[in-house]
Amino acid sequence: MAAGPFVVRNRTRGAILASKVELADTPRARRTGLLKRDILNAGEGLWIYPTQAIHTFGMRFPIDVAFIDRRMRVKRIYHQLAPFRLTSLVWSAESVLELPSGSLAGTGTAVGDELQFSLCEESSV
C-alpha cells in the first residue's frame, strides 16, 4: 500500500472528505495515531489500517470517525468523538478514517456510502 498522503472522496455524495490524509499502517503509527497532534486542520485526516476499533485516550480534541470495510463502504460513523472515549468493535470494518470534527456531517457522509482513496499528486516546482 502506498504511503500517501491521500485525497479521500465520497463517491456516493460526490464530495471531498479530505485532501491530505496520512496513512497509519504500521503498529507504531497505529498506536500513535493523532496523539501527538494539538489539532486536525480542515482537509487533514488519518487513515488507520488495519483496525476494527479505536480510542481517543490522550487526545486533545474531538474527531469524526468513519469505519470502512474492504469494499471501501462506510460501516459506522462517530460524529465529534470526544477525547478519552473508546469505540465499539466494528466486525465488518477493515480500517478507520479520522477527520476533523464536523467533516462527515458537512459532507453528508452516511453509513453505506462508498469512499475512494487516491494518492495526492505532487506538484513539481
Image: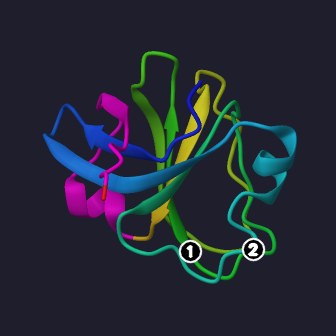
Q: Position of residue 97 (x, y in %)?
A: 51, 46
Give coordinates of residue 75: x percent, y percent: 46, 31
Query: Which span of residues is magenta-colored?
Result: 102-124
Q: Secondary structure at mark 1?
A: loop
Q: For the residues marked 1 and 2, what is the alpha-carbon distance in whole angstroms? A: 14 Å
Magenta stretch holds residue 120: yes
Residue type beneath disc 2: Lys
Instruction: Decide: few, some or many residues near mark 1? Use Cα within 10 Å; few <14, some 14-19, many ≥20.
Output: many
Q: Is residue 62 above or below residue 89?
A: below
**Residue under numbered circle 1:** 62
Residue 74 image label = none
Circle 2 residues within 10 Å: few <14, some 14–19, many ≥20: few
Left or right of 17 on screen, residue 52:
right
Dot 1 or dot 2, earlier in sequence: 2
Image position of 22 with respect to 26: above or below:
below
Which residue occupies 39% across, 26% down? Answer: 73
Q: Quadrant of residue 86?
A: bottom right
Instruction: Give the farthest residue toward the front.
Output: 125
Front residue of this view, candidates 67 and 119 = 119
Q: Which residue is mark 2?
A: 36
